[in-house]
């Protein structure tokens, strides 16, 4: 099932998400729906608030980048109840976009390495370190679980410049190849 994607201005994107408990029903289906929704929108990552949910899940699929970067060929992962333990390394400036902020891209400064604890869809636990592009996407998606969006990192001047575009997005005045849910 393909969900409509929530966009900037929707209060659900500002909520801090909560861990799923082990009795949660339909986790595997939900994760498959998130992958399907993300692929349909040609994204590489999607977090639960982007489909209107406040549970602690995001999915990432970097396999399409495997042609240029063979190490990413098999990178298709669901992160259930993720918690970042530490961010280390240099801070790097890279341009980002977001399915919830269509048409807008800005450079964001983030750490190059992240250590994260999470579970898979069988609730098996992992404690792993990621670097490079996976670390970048993980930090972006993780922010969604904390109610943070990449434009929050922009300077006050930049924010003033972007204000009109963000207001348009909130009103649904934006063209996308995928269905969006316009905030009330
Ligand atoms: Ni995003």
Image (cartoon, helix red, strand yellow):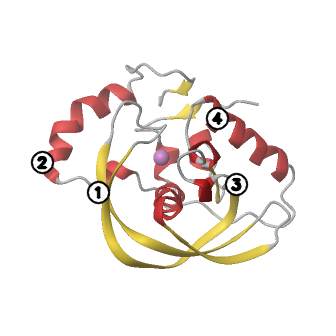
| Residue that badge 2 annotates | 157
Give the mark, 2 or 3, whose residue is nearer the N terminus.
3
Residue corresponding to mark 3: 74
* Real-space Cα separation, disc 4 to disc 3, in angstroms: 15 Å
Which residue in the structure is indicated by mark 4?
39
The residues tagged by marks 4 and 1 sit, at their Cα atoms, a distance apart of 26 Å
* Disc 4 to disc 3: CB gap under 8 Å: no
User: Depth-wise, is mark 2 or mark 3 nearer the camera?
Assistant: 3
Query: Residue at (65%, 52%) from the top-left corner?
Result: 73
Q: Nearer the viewer, mark 3 or mark 1?
A: 3
Q: Give the Cα distance between marks 2 and 3.
A: 40 Å
Going from N to C along the chain, the mark reached first, 4 or 3, is 4
C-alpha distance separating marks 2 and 4:
34 Å
Q: Are marks 4 and 1 in contact (CB under 8 Å)?
A: no
Identify the secondary structure beneath mark 4: helix
Q: Which residue is mark 1?
A: 153
* 84 lies above or below 145: below
Q: Secondary structure at mark 1?
A: helix
């Amino acid at each position: 099932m393909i969900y409509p994607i929530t966009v900037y201005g929707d209060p659900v994107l500002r909520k801090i998400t909560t861990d799923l408990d082990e009795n949660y029903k339909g986790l595997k289906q939900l994760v498959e729906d998130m992958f399907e929704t993300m692929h349909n929108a040609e994204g590489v990552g999607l977090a639960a608030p982007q489909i209107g949910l406040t549970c602690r899940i995001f999915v990432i699929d970097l396999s399409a980048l495997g042609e240029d970067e063979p190490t990413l060929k098999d990178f298709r992962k669901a992160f259930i109840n993720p918690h970042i333990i530490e961010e280390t390394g240099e801070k790097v400036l890279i341009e980002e976009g977001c399915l919830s902020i269509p048409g807008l891209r800005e450079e964001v400064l983030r750490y190059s390495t992240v250590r994260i604890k999470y579970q898979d869809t069988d609730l098996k636990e992992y404690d792993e370190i990621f670097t490079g592009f996976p670390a970048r996407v993980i930090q972006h998606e993780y922010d969604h679980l904390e109610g943070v969006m990449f434009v929050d990192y922009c300077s006050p001047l930049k924010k003033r410049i972007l204000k009109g575009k963000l207001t348009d997005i909130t009103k649904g005045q934006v063209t996308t190849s995928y269905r969006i849910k316009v905030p009330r």
